[in-house]
Image: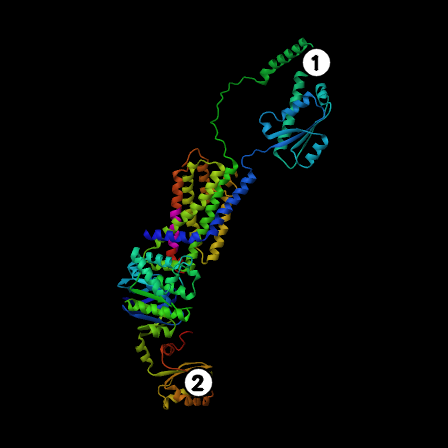
Amino acid sequence: MRFALSSFKKDIARLSRDKVSTLIWILIPLLVGGLVTTLMGSDVKPHGVLLMVDQDESFLSELIAGAYTAGELGELISVEKTTLEEGSARINEGDVSGLLIIPAGFGTAFLDSTPVTLTLKTNPSQTILPGIITNVTEILLDAGFYAHQLFGEEIRLMKNLGDDPPDALIAAIAVTMQNKIEAIAPQLDPLVIDLEIVEPPPKEPAPPLALLFLPGIIIMAVMFSANGIASDWWRERELGTLRRLIYAPGQLGSFIVGKALAATVIIGMVGGLTLVVGFLYHGIPWAKLPSSLIWISISGVALFAWFAALQMMFNNQKTANIVSSMLLFPLLMAGGSFFPLAVLPGWIAAIGRASPNGFIADKLTTEITAGSAWAIDLNSWLTIIVGAVLGLAVCAWRLRSGFARA
Amino acid sequence: MLKVEDLSKNYADFVAVDKINFSAEKGQVFGLLGPNGAGKSTTINCISGLLKPTSGHASVAGHDVVSDGKAARQNLGVVPQELALYEDLPAIENLRYWGKAYGLRGAHLESRITEILETIGLGDRARDLPKEFSGGMKRRLNFGCGIVHKPPVILLDEPTVGVDPQSRARLFEMVEAERDAGACVLYTTHYMEEAERLCDSLAIIDHGKIIAQGTVDALRAQLGALDVLHLNGGFPVDAIKAAIDRLSANGLPDLEIIAQEENSITLTLSQASQHLPAIFAAITAAGGNVSETSLRSPNLETLFLLLTGKELRE
């Protein structure tokens, strides 16, 4: 095994001279990750502006303006009052989510129960926020209709009270309305069913979308470096050093172990760097770093071994590189490096998880989003270790069966 | 020290090496001389463990290369025909790495590296990368990597291919130094002059078979004092053959046709320069004409020609 250490040092020295490749392995995933995070906007919620042209300026029109920003809606929508000209110009430019025009006489018409038209223009280039605004407007209209059905007489009385209504009359109206509410309460809230309220177990908040991209980005770096280091078998063959290795007595196993160790370190460094950037950006607890790093390093060796085994099956380096690269990108696509498995349809995600890198990314997602470190199950660790050993065994077989001799 | 018995290597129906036998001793350079494709490299590959012989045996320092391959390889140093170097590791690191591959460690390894760097003349370039070296320097480093563990048996597979004359002379000195230090060297080449200069004994190989074997002097003696006369021109085959046979029967008994075609003929005879007028006259009388003449005195190349009817470098 002393020769394994010599081989390890030799490969580290050689691979560390190729700084450009190492930089590319790191920079491409970081660039993709940066773009994705920017596009996803991290955890920022969408926010839209509803312009309101209030030509009525009554109590009721004020009530409507308030309805759009009540409660949690206020986080999504803000209402800005404006003139008809400016509002029309801004909605035409696509600057806002919607424009609501409340015509003059709206309050009076509502109290008189006479037809009146509210105009709502929405921004066709947006989908979610205009939909919410439309739904809120429809709910307000329904509320107005039911208010008239229940309290039509009281509303008309209030309208005719004048500027100084007697307190007794106001009290009488209030009592009447209260009685009506109490009368219809059983219909509105019929307690005829004995309900047992079972609260669902508290759901862990779903991790932010940008965080779900992180494992795929890290595995992309691991895949690039694993594929790149795997091509070193071919470089050694072209150099003739594999042939010289065969001349040496019984050193093949140590040579392979040395190469695998060097791959572990290089992939660990490349993946580790992207991991640290991700941990810093998303504020992931550092306690999860060692387990995540070990996972990607061992997984990286498994990927390196299988990429190498694949490349060693071909008769020339060019074909080996082409096939290997052709396989790399579909695997990245399927395995969640461009779209997190968690947001893909179930059957596509299942295919992705069955791919080697999808499996690795999925377990890394578990690790970084779980409540505590070392969340990856024992079976997954065993699977990846066995996969790495089998891959290296195939490489050893190819070396003995002619790859080194050619 | 190195023994090859009835060694054969077949690729399906093609016989690359056909039951060859030879042996070489300590302090001896044994040459394997033959044209490209004769089976020299296949023989080396069988001895070095790169290829498994189809039949027969080879042993290195008493260890069979198949049944006791590890011990055989430990006693073997191979300098392959193609370079086998890490171009992106300094020369000294190449030597250190391959030294470790053969189990050398510590002070012994370091002193051996110093010794080798001195031998191959790269002491002042030890920290440089081979990719910055000339072809000859790479060849020398390639040689150094093959002998860093001081093997008792060294296989050199055409080590001077593509090497400039200066580096070639340096390689010869290195081979001689190893021989003088007691190594048994198997040297393959298709350059007759290399074989004549370096080899104590040699085997001439063609189409996988050894066609002549012995010391250089003994092989030369096989030729006697026969010169080789090669003529180009026009030579009606039957008429010329009859004319040469008549000449042979009438005063030139050692005159013999080695190879004959429509436009060339190769003859052997002793003191050929004295008999050129008679030969030309006989050829002209038989309807032939001579446009070019070459006369060679006896050497291994002419022996190869004599044995195979073709040039060594064809």
Which chain is home to disc 1?
A
Percent x, y of residue A304: 43, 49
| Image quarter in which the N terminus of chain B is found | bottom left
Residue A58: in sight, yes or no?
yes
CA distance separating discs 2 and 1: 142 Å
Quarter where residue B272 is shown: bottom left
For label 1, the residue is A157
Q: Residues within 10 Å of mark 2 (few under 14, many from 20)?
A: few
Look at the magenta stretch and give its main secondary structure: helix
Is A399 above or below relative to B245? Answer: above
Q: Residue at x 71, y 15 (%)?
A: A159
* Residue B176, percent from left and from top: 32, 69
Give the quarter of the image for residue A112: top right
Q: Helix, strand or loop at disc 1?
A: helix
The amino acid marked with disc number 2 is Asp
> Looking at the rendering, in which quadrant would you find the C terminus of chain B?
bottom left
Q: Is residue A227 magenta?
A: no
Q: Which mark, by number, is residue A193?
A: none
Q: Relative to B115, does residue A218 appear above or below in the rendering? A: above
Residues at marks 2 and 1 on the same chain: no
In this picture, residue A147 sits left or right of residue B111: right
Give the left or right position of residue A134, taking residue A291 as reference.
right
Q: Is residue A395 magenta?
A: yes
The residue stretch that appears in magenta: A388-398
Residue B43 shows in the view: no
- Label 1 is placed on what type of residue? Leu
At 68% across and 34% down in the image, what residue appears? Answer: A90
Residue A196: image x %, image y %? 49, 20
- Judging by the rendered image, the residue that carries numbered circle 2 is B238
Question: Looking at the image, which is closer to me, A369 or A44?
Answer: A44
